[in-house]
Amino acid sequence: MGLRHYPSMLGVTLLAVLSLPAVLTSEAGSTAGPDIARGQALAGGECAGCHGADGNSEIPTFPKLAGQHVVYLLKELNDYNQAHRASDIMQPMAASLSEQDKLDIAHFYARQKPAPGTVAKPELLALGKQVYLEGNSKNGVPSCDGCHDEDGAGSGKFPRVAGQHPEYLLEELQRYASGKRSHGTRVMRTVAERLTPEEAEAVSQYMASLE
Amino acid sequence: MKQATMTCRPLLISLLLLAAGPGLAGSADPGSQPVREDELTVLLSMPGDPQRGQESYRLCRGCHKADGSGKAEAEYPQLAGQHARVLLKQMADVRAGRRDSPKMNPFIEHGEVSSQELADIAAFLENLPVPSAIGLGDGRQLELGKHLYLRDCASCHGPNGEGDGQRFYPRVAGQHYPYLYRETLESRDRGRRNANPEMVRVLKHYVDSDIAAVSDYMARLRPAKP
């Protein structure tokens, strides 16, 4: 099959090459570097109402964005546009932002200092730590530190979870498990499906306790 | 999308091909081909970058651990020092549905990791030192294990369990006993669908305790790293 289609693929490649200048032009608008001051000004408007002026939201169901990774923030903003992540609040807001807006806002939040989290149920921390660092191999739950690091710092597309609101974390795990949040892939959905309700709550508390 | 372009514009494509000549033949990106059954060929054609692989390997660490040592009691295999070609074949087989791995399946889907990332991960793992703490069996049947191994296994997996990347025979030395036991048992009982038919034929005559003995022997092998 590969051989039979090969000449046609070449043609397609050529067509792509011929239209390259147009692609470059259309992307040129988004390749300017991030403007932190502009990001701060933009975030100070509608975002700050829920996420806090410095990205340290005080409302437990709205995530803290301070210190979050740029790659992850951009991915999430784009996921709202693609409906991988349903939210009546965030979807229209994300849709109204230009590529440059998103870049500036993401870089602004990434540079803010995350505030420590609040643990509401310290009695769950021991189980939470076990789940976070060991997973649960009986149910095929990988340990969380594999992607999100031992200290919860994460990297790139893997979000920082340290100090996040436990209420938000638990809600997101539940949304993954029920298919309301997907990322377009099955990884977190699978993890969330395999966690018991008690494990999900405990690991949310443990992530909130990380600094 | 490509299909539509292909069928609608045969004349244009032919003209473009004539104009292009053979020089562009190498420019088609094999990673973008939708031909899944050929994934191993694609993977093997990609030079793996161990440094990039270390970052992409994050996705695997939750089970296989940062040092590649896996988890003996969970039957998660040890991957450090395994031949890259063996890792690629097994990953391609899982992706293509030729090997069942329900726990791992969602983590290796297209869209989650690219073919290039798999090539990088394999290159990273191949270069890791084999960890010393390995899950072992009870050590009671090592003489039998050695006898069976040298008679039936060594010709492919190497006298010291070093395996053979060229021929996709895994390194078995220093692999966790519980994983070796499970996989060998599954191969005999046809649960591991991508098992080498020759190996399945040999294993037909093995009882469970033979498999336990040879698995324990393999886990304890320690070839000198070339």
Image (spheres, coloured by chain):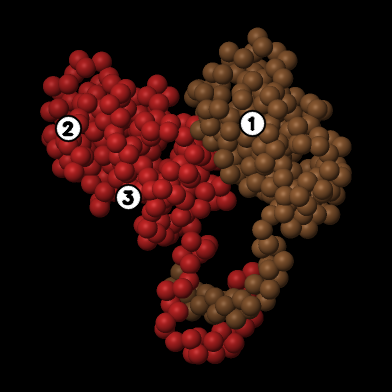
Q: Which residue is at a point 68% across and 73% down the rendered structure image?
A: A25
Q: Earlier in the sequence, mark 2 or mark 3?
A: 3
**Left or right of B143 in this view: B103:** right
Of tags 1 and 2, which is closer to the observer? 1
**Left or right of B155 in this view: A103:** right
**Left or right of B90 in this view: A175:** right
- Residue B108, percent from left and from top: 50, 44
> Which residue is the site of mark 3?
B85
Chain letter belonging to callout 1: A
* Label 2 packing within 10 angstroms: few (<14), some (14-19), many (20+): many
Chain letter belonging to callout 2: B
> Which residue is the site of mark 2?
B149
Quadrant the C terminus of chain A occupies: top right
- Residue A169, percent from left and from top: 70, 28
Label number found at residue A161? 1
Q: Which residue is at a point 30% across and 23% down the rendered structure image?
A: B133
- Residue A67, percent from left and from top: 66, 37
Of tags 2 and 3, which is closer to the observer? 3
Tell which of A168 and A98 is nearer to you: A98
Judge whether B99 appears above or below A7 on screen: above
Label number found at residue B158? none
**Residue type at tag 3:** Arg
Judge whether B83 appears above or below B178 on screen: below
In which quadrant of the rendered view does residue A119 lie?
top right
Chain letter belonging to callout 3: B
Q: What hue represents chain A?
A: brown
**Residue type at tag 2:** Tyr
Tell which of B101 and B192 is nearer to you: B101
**In this rendering, does residue A3 appear at all?**
yes
**Mark 3 near mark 1, Cβ–Cβ under 8 Å?**
no
The CA distance from mark 1 to mark 2 is 48 Å
**In this rendering, does residue A63 appear at all?**
no
